[in-house]
Every structure is written in structure tokens, then in C-alpha cells.
Image: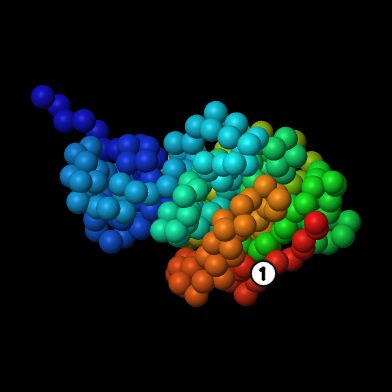
Amino acid sequence: MKSPPPLTIEEVAQILKVSKYTLYELIKKKEIPAQRIGSQLRIEPESPFHSQSSSPVSAAAPESADNFNPESTSRAENPGLHNLVFIGSHEPIVELFADFWKHAATPLGLRIEFKGSMEGLISLYHNQAQVSGIHLWDEQTQDYNLPFVHYVLPGESITLVNLVQRVQGFIVQPGNPWGLHSWEDLIRPGLRFINRQKGSGTRLRLDSSLQKAKISPAEIQGYTQEVTTHLDIASSVANDQADVGIGIQSAAHRMGLDFIPLFHERYDLVFLHEKIPAEAWQKILMILNAPAFHKAIERQVGYDTSLTGKILYHRI
């Protein structure tokens, strides 16, 4: 009988009901064996089940976007709460926070859905979540996030807290074979680009930069090809489905790809303060300011924790 093919990271994460971040950590610790096929990690079908029975981490890990049930967000309408609901832009450190959260002494679960910065703010507006993560660049004020918070949530009691600062840039094949360094390089004939979805902070920054450089999106082959996470961008390049995409440095590093930095940015958490129980709010701030959390972030490439946990804005 022909043996079943190896599983992808996404498939194993769904089987074990863990975040991809947790799964990568289990692989790094050799708790789940994996092999590299080309530029991708693959796991034999029986491995996750053998490891799951002996690994308390995988059995208790929080749910993430890979297994998120959108119907659960209806609980956010009654902040008597069984879960805190996060809807926002993709950032692996959010999944790291979820791993810390599951060990906090709180009865609240944490559900995560990665949809993009603008959709995250709109979810707060419609009371579908209590927390969002955003990195929206405002060209007029030359600042991140706060102008959009004022515009989308003008009457809400909100608190803006920095999660992390990070680097974004071109994710390319090892050796940067196209020699890419600037926005103008994206219009080279034959170069295949992979884009983030509309409403994401990365897409907004790209479009702003193209406008300043007087580059039409129609000049970029693949501009209309969209994916929803930084890891999707890296995976597309690693699988030779694209030559370049814009994403965070840590995603390129995980896939063994090269990275050409373009800009630093601030990724902030937006909280509907009045809809989060006081005890949960204290736990959130405790985790965000914990030295262990900062050290865990700093073990990843491309991050700056100098503002992590700092309250940047509060409106009652």
C-alpha cells in the first residue's frame, strides 16, 4: 500500500489545534520530527499523533487563525465573555502572546483571526472583537495607527498599546537573484510579484510608496495576486510561485529566504477598554511587559521591543 504523503505545516497545525508559531517551536525542540523537502518543511502523517500524546504544550495550545471559528465572535457582543476575540493584521508575535496567555491565571480564552488591519478596526466598530492588531501608515501625519483609530472608532473608549516594532521588506530567493533593492525594481519585465490583500497595512504602505515613486500598479506583474499573511508571501516565493513579495523579516528567515529591508514600522494593539474585564486587562499588561515575553520576541529576527507594552494612547 502506498504511504500517505508528508503533511504541510498548516495541515499539522490544524490537526493539533495549535498555532503555526507553536508548531515551529515544537519542531525546533525536536518534539515533532520534520524534514525539509526543497524549501518547505514536511511532517510524516504519524508523527503529530505520537508527539501529541507526550506533549502537554500541543494539547493545551490556543486556537489561531488556522482553526478559528468565526461564529465564536458573536460572544463579543456580550462582554460577559468566554473568550477575548482578536481580529486584525497578521503578526506571529500575536500567536506568541497567545501562548503566554494560555498560561495566565484567567478563565478567558483567546481566539485569533487574521484578516488585515482595516478589517480589524471595522470588527471593533461592529463589536465583533475586543482586540485588534494594526500597522496602518498615514502619509499625511507620517505616523502609524492613531489617525485610523480616530477615524474608525471616534466614540469608543480605546487603549492603544505597542506590541512590537518590526522590519518589512522584499522577501526574495536566496542570493537575491534579481538584485532587488527599490520600489522601481518591481516593474522589471518578467519579475513575478505576490501581493497582500486589500485592507492590510502592508498593502496600504505598498500603495503609498508606489504613488510616491509614480509607479502604476498595472506595471507590476502579479500585483492582483493576493495572499493574506506574511508566511503566505514567504511560502509563495519559496515554492517559486513568485519572485518577490513584501513581508516581515521573520517570515523570510523561517523559510530560508533572503530579505531586503525597506522600512521599519510599529505594530500596535487596539483594545476596546470598557469591554475587557479589569482582571483580564491586568493580565494583558503583565504579559506585554514581562521580561520573558520580551526575550521570546528578541529570539526572533527583525523585531524591536523597546516600545513593547507601552500605552501609546488612552481615551475614556
Left or right of residue 46: residue 153: right
Q: Give the residue at the far left of this rendering.
A: 1
Residue 70 lies in quadrant: top right
Q: What percent of the width, then of the height, locates residue 109? A: 48, 46
Residue 231 visible here: no
Q: Residue at x 34, y 49 (%)?
A: 60
Q: What percent of the width, then of the height, locates residue 279? A: 57, 58
Question: Which of the image's four quarters has the N terminus?
Answer: top left
Tell me: residue 213, above or below residue 85.
below
Q: Residue at x 56, y 56 (%)?
A: 280
Q: Nearer the viewer, residue 99 or 229?
A: 99
Number of labels in the image equals: 1
Residue 4 visible here: yes
Left or right of residue 179: residue 13: left
Left or right of residue 18: residue 83: right
Q: What percent of the width, then of the height, locates residue 228? A: 58, 40
Three-letter residue code for mark 1: Lys
Pointer 1 local density, CA inside 10 Å: few below 14, some 14–19, many at least 20: some
Q: How is the image coloured?
A: rainbow
Q: Nearer the viewer, residue 116 or 215?
A: 116
Q: Residue at x 37, y 37 (%)?
A: 14
Q: Residue at x 47, y 50 (%)?
A: 107
Q: What percent of the width, then of the height, locates residue 237? A: 49, 46
Question: Which of the image's four quarters has the C terminus?
Answer: bottom right
Q: Nearer the viewer, residue 117 or 196?
A: 117
Q: Nearer the viewer, residue 210 or 62?
A: 62
Q: Give the residue at the far top of this rendering.
A: 1
SS assignment at label 1:
loop
Residue under numbered circle 1: 310
